[in-house]
Image: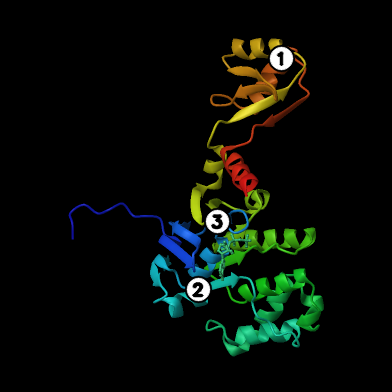
């Protein structure tokens, strides 16, 4: 043992290092170093084909990495799969429900395979999961007749059969109507409030902004940005765009108050490094400058994501 102890690293629900997956000659995932802090809701953001599903499948032991390491709660995968995976609930493509059984019957079968559920607890767990995803009324209908959104809800119900330490949701709002999307957001918020770590993939920045505390952006199989959502959103130049017919008076009024600003084709761009949006508006109003509209300039993450999605 060394004399100096290393500073304790925050506990991670999932950690990958150098993760790589090749399908023949296709590099699906390349050198992914992902940290999912315990208690976080981490949004894995990326355009189609950026490697989200492949990364998730490797985390869950559903596909074998070509190279790299995976740990779940500090335990190496796949060696620790039997002890760790029962604590992990997952919604991934192709959950394989039986088409001729009802939603309830399918979930009863899933529940029977859950090591953490005692037989006596199964019926209640199934009913609670059906209720939670809004499928209680359709529970006795055959799975075959379910809509895409209902099938998606079934996958979510299966992930939520037991209280989990970690829930992994691959594009959970795919195929859902606006009400279904709101329900998924509320399920994620409930899980977060209960201390469960959530990893959720999406190709929509708005989705991630609405639900996540952390984000990892994937592009062409690699992580191009990761960290706390607020930090990433604030990265880059924070600016406020002001729409006013009196640009010159506005610039002068702001400069008198030591707030840097300049005219741009999009409007008056005010530097927010040393001030706030309400302060800028108050300053302009005090100087009798008419303000039609103000909005924040696109953030670092929005710019990054726009570049990635526009390029693909
Ligand atoms: N089983 C497979 N066989 C061959 N190539 C695959 C397979 N699965 C994924 N790929 C390829 O790996 C790359 C990453 O795919 P992946 O499904 O992980 O991306 P994704 O970010 O989840 O995309 P989407 O948002 O469309 O679901 C793509 O080029 C895809 O074509």
- Left or right of residue 283, residue 40 in this image: left
Q: Is residue 231 above or below residue 130?
A: above
Q: What residue is pinned by disc 2?
A: 63
Tell me the residue at 70%/17% (across/down): 284
Q: Position of residue 13 (x, y in %)?
A: 46, 63
Disc 1 crowd, CA 10 A, few/some/many (<14, 14-19, 20+): many
Q: Which mark is residue 186?
A: none
Q: What residue is pinned by disc 3?
A: 42
For ligand 1, give the image quadrant. Answer: bottom right
Q: Name the foreground residue: 177 vs 186.
A: 177
Disc 1 CB within 8 Å of nearest ligand 1 atom: no
> The residue tagged with tag 1: helix, strand or loop?
helix
Is label 3 or label 1 in front?
A: 1
Q: Position of residue 246 (x, y in %)?
A: 75, 13
> The residue tagged with tag 2: helix, strand or loop?
loop
Q: From the image, which quarter does the N terminus lie in?
A: bottom left
- Left or right of residue 258, residue 147 in this image: right
- Left or right of residue 157, residue 244 in this image: right
Mark positioned earlier in the residue sequence (1 or 2): 2
- Farthest residue to the front: give it: 25
Q: What residue is pinned by disc 1?
A: 247
Q: Position of residue 25 (x, y in %)?
A: 49, 65
Q: Tell me the CA gap for discs 3 and 2.
A: 21 Å
Tell me the residue at 62%/17% (across/down): 262
Is label 1 or label 2 in front?
A: 2
Q: Would residue 164 be visible to someone looking at this image?
A: yes
Disc 2 CB within 8 Å of nearest ligand 1 atom: yes
Tell me the residue at 41%/59% (across/down): 11
Image-quadrant location for residue 297: top right
């Amino acid at each position: 043992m060394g004399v100096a102890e290393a500073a304790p690293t925050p506990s991670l629900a999932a950690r990958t290092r150098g993760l790589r997956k090749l399908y023949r000659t296709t590099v699906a995932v390349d050198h992914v170093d992902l940290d999912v802090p315990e208690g976080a809701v981490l949004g894995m953001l990326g355009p189609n084909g950026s490697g989200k599903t492949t990364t998730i499948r490797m985390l869950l032991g559903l596909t074998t990495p070509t190279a790299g390491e995976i740990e779940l709660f500090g335990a190496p995968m796949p060696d620790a799969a039997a002890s760790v995976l029962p604590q992990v609930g997952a919604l991934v493509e192709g959950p394989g429900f039986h088409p001729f059984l009802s939603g309830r019957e399918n979930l009863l079968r899933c529940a029977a395979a859950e090591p953490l559920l005692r037989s006596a607890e199964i019926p209640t767990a199934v009913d609670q999961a059906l209720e939670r995803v809004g499928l209680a009324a359709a529970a006795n209908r055959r799975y075959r007749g379910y809509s895409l959104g209902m099938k998606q809800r079934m996958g979510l119900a299966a992930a939520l059969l037991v209280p989990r330490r970690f829930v992994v949701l691959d594009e959970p709002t795919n195929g859902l109507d606006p009400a279904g999307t709101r329900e998924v957001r509320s399920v994620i918020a409930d899980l977060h409030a209960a201390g469960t770590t959530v990893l959720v993939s999406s190709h929509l920045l708005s989705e991630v902004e609405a639900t996540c505390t952390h984000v990892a952006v994937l592009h062409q199989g690699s992580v191009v940005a990761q960290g706390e959502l607020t930090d990433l959103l604030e990265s880059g130049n924070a600016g406020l765009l002001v729409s006013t017919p009196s640009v010159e008076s506005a610039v002068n009024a702001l400069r008198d108050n030591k707030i840097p600003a300049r005219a741009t084709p999009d409007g008056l761009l005010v530097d927010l490094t040393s001030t706030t949006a309400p302060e800028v508006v108050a300053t302009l109003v005090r100087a009798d400058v008419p303000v039609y509209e103000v909005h924040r300039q696109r953030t670092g993450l929005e710019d990054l994501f726009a570049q990635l999605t526009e390029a693909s």
